[in-house]
Image (cartoon, rainbow, N blue to C red):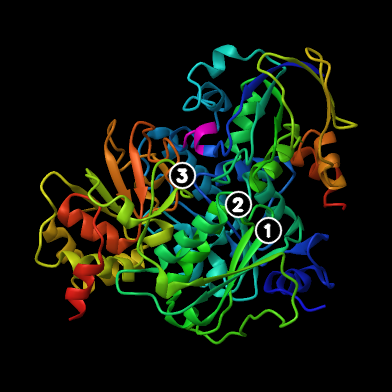
Amino acid sequence: MKGKAHVYDVDNIDTDRIIPGKYTKTLDMSVLAEHCLEDLDENFNSKVTKGDILVAGENFGCGSSREQAPVAIKVAGIYAVIAKSFARIFYRNAINVGLPILEISDHNINDKSELDIDLQSGMVKDITDGKEYQSAKMPKVMVDILEEGGLVSYLSKYGDYKL
Amino acid sequence: MGQTIVEKILSRHAGKDIAASDLAIVNVDAAMATDASAPFAIKAFREMGGKKPWNPERMVFVIDHGAPAPNERIANLHKIIREFTTETGSTLFDAGSGICHQIMIDEEQAHPGELIIGADSHSVTYGAIGAFSTGVGATDLAAVMLTGKTWLKVPPTIRVELNGKPNTGVQSKDIVLAVVEKLGMDGATYKALEYSGSALEYLSLGGRMTIANMAVEMGGKAGVIETTGLELPYDFEHVHPDSDANYIAEYSIDISALRPKVSTPHSPANVSDIDEVLGTKIDLVFLGTCTNGRLEDLHTAASILKKKKLAPGVRMIVTPASRKVMNAAMADGTMNILSDAGAMFIPPGCGPCVGTHLGVPADSETILSTANRNFPGRMGNPKAQVFLSSPATVAASALKGEITDPTEVMEEIIS
């Protein structure tokens, strides 16, 4: 999957900044997408084309357990999130809603670079500067959930967890 | 090899001995969702083919984040929760009952040694009574409703020993802010915190809840406090680690050396001693939340504000953590004292902490709050400056109109 990188070289981007609490109480996903990351970059929405890739620093998604955070990012058109590290609950939530996330502890991906992501191998290729990065391995159960498109489809299919 | 508290509880719920870094499927004793997560969870539960939660009595729904409903959108989400609980026999605490975490402990939906999953990050609070509890998102919660189980990776444990006696003016909030200062925002990511030490004898149930509550501010999966010295209104088996348990890191904090602490904008981990921010002018103080909205917190504020008035131009919002807390504060005169001083009361619930309603600050206003988070926009306005502190610091500062060390006024009260 190829997409353009939107790089926010910021650590600790919390879920309040991903989607402020005042917008989370809704089942209308388009509202979430509309306000996605607005307190970090008010032009975020206008910059994103469907299939783009969000790139951030350490501890991305810290704070609240709101699943609206990965949903907002996904519905805003982002195909995958790359970060140096992720907060625990965000990581699980992203997989559960079918938003691919890749942990790459050390990278120098530039804004607007063209990336090619291979989810099977976890390889990320920066087409613009030719560099390649291997993301951290996920437990098998998470790979399976992601392959089914999220936890709802996974449990509808299997009825229970398989480690 | 001995086990930490978390390894013991998780082993019991996995039906086999497991240790740090093992993946396991574990049985869940109770689950909880709020109006911020339940509508998503109910939707996902139905999409998974769910009809009734695995154990309706211990599937607890609490309407607290936008309670009472500030608009028709949220009112309709509340309706979804009410209809679902009626239909399935699940347990509901409706608007006005209080904050989910206060309710889980007060209404005995969480017990020592249990495993509890909540669709709210501050579900780690039940570590205060020696339970393993952690926060998840709505779809993970839906899966618990469906199966009565969840999967997890057993977290390595960081041991934090709290020793010594706190000085006058230093409260549980200051202690946990000292831990956050030491570990930082991601110091406990994918790990559990386990608190022990001689200082536990000075910690009330409420004080323990304040400390456990902020484990997630360090990224922690759980923050469990050894039950030594804990008193509950029922008999329970105490929870201790084995003496040869394996820890990934160990810290020791001398409580007697601590000064009151303040988190400055815009992160709970921006912790300083109060001395560095003394005199910062404030517009609004907020006493409440799952961190510090309990009766003892209201008592602290009332002892400082008794027969006094808020500084001119300062507003004060008080949100009792639950109806129980509010009723007790009404019965013993605490609410009168605070109201006479000029404070306004809003209904038990999350109130302005999540920026949804009931006290959104204006641009460039400065707020001193007893909450656990001060991320940009947390209280509904990214242009506001939110500081975090203990209830004593909040009350002393409300009197002066600027961030004030509560030590002196607390010493006067004691003498």
Name of the residue lying farthest toward the right: A121
Q: Position of residue A127 (x, y in %)?
A: 81, 14
For the record, the magenta segment spans: A16-20
Amino acid, disc 2: Gly
Disc 2 from disc 3: Cα separation: 13 Å
Name of the residue lying farthest toward the bottom: B235
Disc 2 and disc 1 on one polypeptide chain? yes
Disc 1 from disc 3: Cα separation: 20 Å
Are there few (<14), some (14-19), or many (20+) residues within 10 Å of tag 1?
Answer: many
Q: Position of residue B125 (x, y in %)?
A: 53, 63
Residue lying at 39% horizontally and 34% vertically, measured from the top left: B72
Viewer-proximal residue among B159 and B306: B159
Question: Sequence-wise, which precedes: disc 2 or disc 3?
Answer: 2
Disc 2 from disc 1: Cα separation: 8 Å
Tell me the subunit letter for badge 3: B
Amino acid, disc 1: Lys
Are there few (<14), some (14-19), or many (20+) residues within 10 Å of tag 2?
Answer: many
Q: Which label is found at residue B219?
A: 2
Q: Position of residue B20 (x, y in %)?
A: 78, 64
Q: Are the residues tagged 2 and 1 within 8 Å (C-beta)?
A: yes
Compared with residue A46, is residue B19 higher up or lower down, i.e. above or below?
A: below
Whether residue A18 appears in magenta in the rendering, the answer is: yes
Residue lying at 67% horizontally and 56% vertically, measured from the top left: B53
Compared with residue B214, is residue A53 higher up or lower down, i.e. above or below?
A: above
Q: Is residue B34 visible?
A: yes
Q: Which label is found at residue B267?
A: 3
Q: Which label is found at residue B191?
A: 1
